Image (cartoon, helix red, strand yellow):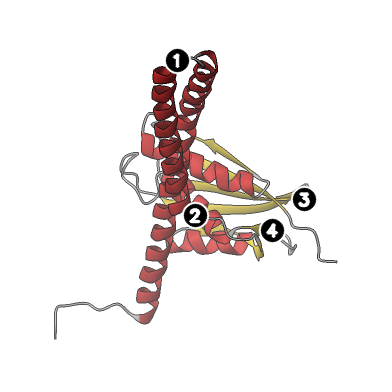
Amino acid sequence: MSSTQTNTPAGASLDAERERLADLERRSLLAEQARQQAHKMRTPLSVIKLVAETLQLELVEDRAHRERLQRLLGAAATLSDGLSDSVRSTRFGDGPPQRLDAAALGAGVIRVHGGRVVPLAEDVGVVVEVERDSLEAALVHCLRLIGIGTDCIGARDHRPLLECRVVAGRLVLRLRAEGGRAAELPVERADLRLMAQAAERAARDSGGTLHLAEDTATLELPLAPSPA
């Protein structure tokens, strides 16, 4: 018998789903990094443009200096266009919102990572309007931030747990780690800050909020209104 072990159909399907989620995670972080860099650089570029334009007005009679300032404005415009191109080329999660069962979607992400789910206590509708890729990526980011599937916070023997509740017209998805000691989030790490920013953006774009505390992450999303 060959010593090479092949995946069962179920195992192969699980591997494919892990890879799909990992791809969403990478694309989300790349897009967020491009947005953050563009945001940081646009403010000084605006200042440069304003000062250069003001000096041009003051140096109406000085053709040589006006030409130099025009070259400066051209360089600033080129850099600004490059930033916009970078953001456009790494776009992620800009599809139309979909009506979907966010509790079921979250449960799928958790189970792919070997976790368990505490379902809703009551059989109530939990349809929300979200951009699906953004929400799935945000859930994966939240898992990383509580130490699941990464060694950036340190090795901990635990698995994710998802608790679902409906409170005041909002779906609450609370993720935490079971079977491990809580570790303080090393906020100085740029990769973890980027994960938090991307997850917070996804929640905000859906009209919701994200709360991070120790080894828990709580995502709250407004329930979608019933169709007319």
Foreground label between 3 and 2: 2
For disc 1, the marked residue is: 62
Query: Looking at the image, is 8 positioned above or below residue 199?
Result: below
Tell me the distance, in whole angstroms, between the alpha carbons under discs 4 and 1: 61 Å
Tell me the distance, in whole angstroms, between the alpha carbons under discs 3 and 4: 10 Å
Residue 155 rendering spot, x and y as whole percentages: 31, 43
For disc 3, the marked residue is: 169
For disc 2, the marked residue is: 92
Tell me the distance, in whole angstroms, between the alpha carbons under discs 1 and 3: 65 Å
- The first of marks 1 and 3 along the sequence is 1
The kind of secondary structure element at disc 3 is: loop
Q: Quadrant of residue 34?
A: top left
For disc 4, the marked residue is: 128
The kind of secondary structure element at disc 2 is: loop
Residue 188 visible in the picture: yes
Query: Residue flagged by tag 1: what amino acid is it?
Result: Asp
Judged from this view, the residue extending furthest toward the bottom is 1
Foreground label between 3 and 4: 4
Query: Residue flagged by tag 2: what amino acid is it?
Result: Phe
Task: Return the residue nearer the eye: 183 or 211.
Answer: 211
Tell me whether circle 2 and circle 4 mark residues in contact (CB < 8 Å): no
